Amino acid sequence: LAALTGVLLSSILLAACGENSPSILNVAGPVAESESSLFWLILYLALAIFILVEGVLIYSIFKYRERPGTPNPYQNHGNMLLELVWTVIPTVVLFVILFFTIRGLLQVAPEAEPAASASQPKIEVTAVGHQWYWEFYYPKYNVTTADTLEVPVGTTVHVKLFSNNVIHSFWVPSLTGKTDVVPGHDNTKWFVAQKTGLFTGICAEYCGTQHANMRFNVNVVDNSSFMTWISGQQQAAAAPTDALAQKGEALFKNQCASCHGIVGVNVTQFYNTAQECTDLPGGKANGTPQCLIGPNLTHFGSRSLIAGGVLDNNTKDNNCDPNNPNLMQSCNLAKWLKDPQAVKPGNDMAIGALSNAEIQQLIAYLEGLK
Ligand code: CUA
């Protein structure tokens, strides 16, 4: 028992370690705060009951253990007072939990989303669940990115959840609990990040072979950094200037453009399959469907994660410098382009075999898309 309690407690404590460990105990905003306070309340109540019940049990085991010469203890058949006590107390405990659960539900409900004001600004994001990556679309700014949700600190983030394939679930333990992303049933949710930093997000509904690798980060930055990021993302992709990247662009058009869009190269809008074929402006209704299955790559080089959040876009220290002699070993994008099925089996990246020279060209082009 002691060992079990120790394991339980230490796993709870360990779960709280690490700056961006995906834990509901690393609270970084009011929605997660409300959820974790309910967790602690129930844990403490359960702990008190556990200690009381186990205490009485252990006391009885010792007190009334069989010893030579002692008579059997008093045999009791029914005690009205005791039965009332152990019926009323659990009922009261359950009503306390019910009260705080309902209060918590109301605190995080869509209706509780703070109205936009000067002191509490708001942004809107559509989170699109793909098999298997997250795409984030900012309708006000007409910006799309993948794998990392950039948000300003202290701002209400209104999230529209969209899928046109299977059910996913959007979960950022430090910021907000899970909400399912259901095809044909557009849920919404909201959260506010009270501190800057990187928070891990997870898909929390089994959605196919790479469900476990459908991760994302929420990068919470100050407001001016966010606006700088937005204005960078709003630029069309700059045409490559050096010869290697130009070859990469030609290769992209030839090999990648049927699944991936780059604004100004093969598409004119940021939307891809899920959104534009259905309910967003610029979609089918406008007669301009650009139904691409892979992430939009317009600002690929500025992203911190690739391959559905599984790999760092490790461009630092010349790792992905196309002229790095160890490019194939040190650059994650090189590994991904060489054999995407080895990195993430079952994914839809159906690229033909590329030579190392071709990979070098593609890296020169894609990493240059800041
Ligand atoms: Cu998407 Cu699990």
Image: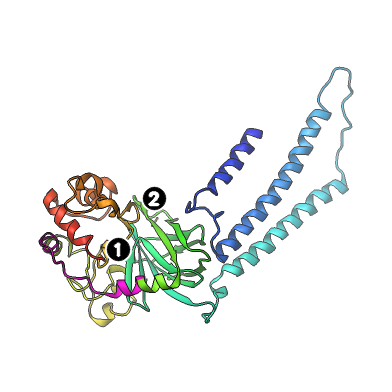
Secondary structure state at the residue bearing disc 2:
helix
Is residue 232 located in the magenta-colored stretch of the structure?
A: yes
Q: Quadrant of the N terminus?
A: top right
Is residue 213 located in the magenta-colored stretch of the structure?
A: no
Asked whether the viewer can see residue 1, the reply is: no
Figure colour scheme? rainbow
Magenta: main secondary structure? helix
Q: Position of residue 43 (x, y in %)?
A: 65, 50
Q: Is residue 252 left or right of residue 53?
A: left
Q: Position of residue 149 (x, y in %)?
A: 39, 64
Q: Position of residue 20 (x, y in %)?
A: 47, 54
Quadrant position of residue 255: bottom left
- Return the mark for residue 302: 1
Label 1 to label 2, Cα distance in Å?
A: 24 Å
Asked whether the viewer can see residue 335, the reply is: yes
Residue at the spot of label 2: 212
Q: Quadrant of the C terminus?
A: bottom left
Q: Quadrant of ligand 1?
A: bottom left
Q: Amino acid at mark 2?
A: Ala
Query: Residue 272, relative to residue 140: is it above or below?
Result: above
Q: Is residue 149 left or right of residue 346?
A: right
Query: Residue 137, relative to residue 213: is it above or below?
Result: below
**Which residue is pictured at 60% across the width and 69% down the height?**
107
Crowding around mark 2 (Cα neighbors within 10 Å: few <14, some 14 to 19, many 20+) is some
* Span colored in magenta: 229-250
**Which residue is pictured at 62% across the width and 36% down the height?**
4
Q: Disc 2, ligand 1: is the CB inside 8 Å?
A: yes
